[in-house]
C-alpha cells in the first residue's frame, strides 16, 4: 500500500480523512461488505489485476464496487456532510485531490471498456443502512 506522508497532514481531521480513504478495510468499506454479504453475494477484495483495485469485485457478474471517501474523492453532492475542501494548505491539497478524481475517471473508463460495470458507493451513503441495501440490490440485480 502506498503511504502518503506529508507535513500538511498534521491536522487530526486531515490525517483521519487520509487514513479513512487510503487504507483498506475502513468502516464504510466494512459496512458495504457486510450488507453485500448478507444479501448472499460473494466477492473478491481489492483485485490488483483490475484498474484501480476495486474494493469489491464480483467476477461472474462482471461488476465492481468502489467505496469512496467523500473528502478524498471529492464527493460532488451539495448535501454531502463529509466533503470539504480544506482551507488550510489549499494549494497543497487541490492538485492532489484533482489528480485523485482524474485517476478514478480513467480507471472506470478502462474497466468499462473491458466490459465491467462499475459503481461508486460514497462514504456518506453508508450511514443509512437501508438505503445502502436498496442501492446495492438495485446495482447487483440489474
Ligand atoms: Zn459524501
Image (spheres, helix red, strand yellow):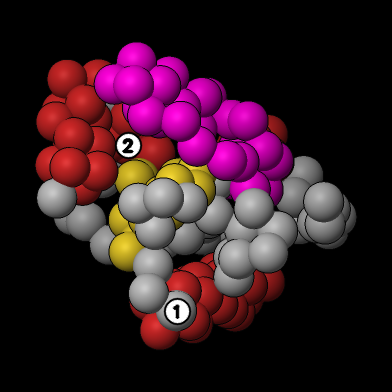
Picture layout, residue 131 above or below residue 105 = above
Element under label 2? helix
Which mark identifies residue 124? 2
- In the depicted structure, whether residue 15 falls above or below residue 63: above
Indicate if the residue with disc 2 has its beta carbon within 8 Å of ligand 1: yes
In three-dimensional space, the C-alpha distance between marks 1 and 2, rounded to whole angstroms, equals 29 Å
Q: Is residue 37 magenta?
A: yes
Q: Residue at x 69, y 41 (%)?
A: 23
| Residue 130 found in image quarter | top left
Q: Which residue is mark 1?
A: 114
Q: Which residues are magenta?
A: 20-46
Residue 49 is one of the magenta-drawn residues: no
Q: In the rendered image, is residue 115 in sight?
A: yes
- Give the image location of residue 29, x and y in percent: 50, 33
* x then y, percent, for residue 101: 48, 72
Looking at the rendering, which quadrant does residue 11 occupy?
Answer: top right
List x then y, in percent, for residue 140.
24, 43
Please, what secondary structure does the residue beneath circle 1 have? loop
At a point 63% along the width and 48% down the height, the residue shown is 46
Residue at 62% x, 58% y is: 53
Labels in figure, total? 2
Would you call the spot at circle 1 few (<14 residues within 10 Å), some (14-19), or many (20 or more)? few
Task: Determine crowd level at label 2: few under 14, some 14-19, many 20+ residues with C-alpha closer than 10 A.
Answer: some
Does residue 93 show up? no
Image position of 13 with respect to 92: above or below = above
Q: Is residue 2 left or right of residue 93?
A: right
Amino acid at each position: 500500500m502506498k503511504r502518503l506522508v506529508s507535513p500538511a497532514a498534521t491536522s487530526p481531521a486531515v490525517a483521519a480523512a487520509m487514513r479513512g480513504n487510503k487504507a483498506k478495510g475502513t468502516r464504510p468499506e466494512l459496512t458495504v461488505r457486510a450488507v453485500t454479504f448478507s444479501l448472499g453475494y460473494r466477492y473478491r477484495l481489492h483485485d490488483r489485476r483490475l484498474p484501480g483495485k476495486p474494493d469489491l469485485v464480483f467476477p461472474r457478474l462482471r461488476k465492481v464496487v468502489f467505496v469512496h471517501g467523500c473528502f478524498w474523492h471529492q464527493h460532488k453532492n451539495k448535501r454531502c456532510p463529509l466533503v470539504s475542501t480544506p482551507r488550510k494548505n489549499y494549494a497543497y491539497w487541490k492538485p492532489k485531490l484533482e489528480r485523485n478524481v482524474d485517476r478514478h475517471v480513467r480507471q472506470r473508463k478502462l474497466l468499462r471498456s473491458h466490459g465491467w460495470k462499475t459503481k461508486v458507493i460514497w462514504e456518506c451513503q453508508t450511514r443509512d443502512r437501508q438505503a445502502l441495501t436498496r442501492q446495492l440490490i438495485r446495482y447487483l440485480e440489474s
